[in-house]
Image (cartoon, rainbow, N blue to C red):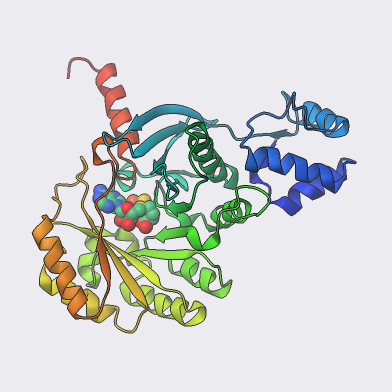
Amino acid sequence: MTSLHDLPYPALERALVADGLRPAHARALWQAVHREGATQLTERPDFSPPLARWAAEHTGAGGRYFLDAPTVAADTASSDGLTRKFLLRLADGQTIETVLMGYTGRSTACVSTQAGCAMGCVFCATGQMGFVRHLRAGEIVAQVLHVQRTLRARGAARLRNLVLMGMGEPLHNADAVLTALEILTDDRGAALAPGRVTISTVGVVPGILRLAEEKRAFNLAVSLHSADAAERAALVPASRRWPLAELIAACRAYGAKTGRRIFFEWTLIAGTNDSPAHAEQVAALLSGIYAHVNLIPLNPTDGFSGAATAGAAAREFQRVLRERGLPSTVRQRRGIDVAAGCGQLRAEKARAVATTLSPSQ
Ligand code: SAH
Ligand code: SF4
């Protein structure tokens, strides 16, 4: 069985033509799936009889195709009403997080690319749970379509921004991620603008070089957290595989090849990577790179004892960067009251289940 959500437009068209349908049928099917977000394809008055027959025969029980239709295992809204966080359950029971920020014209979806993550960043709830599996392209696409339906139900404008900052490491699952983005930026469907899509990576060097080589028009965010190789390795075990010096060389190559700005993410952890000296160090490391730094005070998680940097220290860090000519933004993780850090909602649910199973604790 193949998910229709896994297929980019040309592949869908080939599949339908191979079954005796016409290219126009592919267009109608694509619009139903990717523009409307339909999760089942029977009883659609807009489908011509041959397409309706095909859908009934091939997308129902026992058919060759299916649609990715994750169910909502949890749906929480932040107290300010601006953030919705979904825990979506996939066909095999795995749960992943998808977040919608803002209902105005400036809405952003944050989606997952893997169940769990293999990179093991010590402060990250997803890293703490370990790797479960890659998501297919269709499972990434389906998260965006779920967000689109949520917006539509509120009468809100179409989704504007997409960030791959949910659970998982996008460039550890690059083929599925790039296929999903090809599908989501197709004008005939979800029609996201490539320039409003951000891929966030822990620093998978081959993936960064691939984005540069293929001149992909997406934004790139690199989760740096430290400008010192040993200190970074303590926070981000993946940097033993792709050392800091190689990562920065890849960023320089990316910048030279694409001319694009790179966003550097920096989780501010009190007493660990938030001193003015750390700020001097990052400014030196990134000198000559067209860069913007996003400073994110740590969201505490169960498996890590660190604390968030206080506002005054964050502003001081930012002042040092500014003096060195490096622009930055301090980002408050929105909707912190709904466990906004990546992987935290799933971890919370797992805890609740554990407590239910062992009431004596
Ligand atoms: N794997 C990718 C994308 C998902 S994580 C990456 O690491 O870039 C998205 C961002 O959230 C990363 O910058 C990550 O460092 C940050 N993050 C993870 N856990 C966090 C926490 N507990 N507090 C603050 N930021 C966190
Ligand atoms: Fe994986 Fe990103 Fe979490 Fe690191 S921060 S463990 S790369 S999801």
Residue under the image location 34 percent in, 74 percent down: 291
- Front in this rendered view, residue 16 or 32: 32
Which residue is painted at 90% across and 41% down in the image? 20
Question: Is 47 placed above or below 218 here?
Answer: above
Image quadrant in which the N terminus is located? top right
- In the picture, residue 102 is in which quadrant? top left
Front-lying residue, 156 or 358:
156
Query: Where's residue 237, x and y in %?
Result: 30, 59
Q: Nearer the viewer, residue 344 or 351?
A: 344
Residue 322 seen anywhere in this rendered image of the structure: yes
Q: Work out whether 121 lies above or below 32.
A: below
Tally of numbered discs: 0
Question: Where does the image place residue 353, in percent across and percent down from the top left?
Answer: 31, 23
The residue drawn where x is 60% and y is 55% is 185
Q: Is residue 312 above or below residue 20?
A: below
Q: Position of residue 254 (x, y in %)?
A: 46, 76
Residue shown at 21% from the left, 81% from the top: 324
Question: Percent position (x, y) of residue 28?
Answer: 76, 41
**Quadrant for the C terminus in the image:** top left
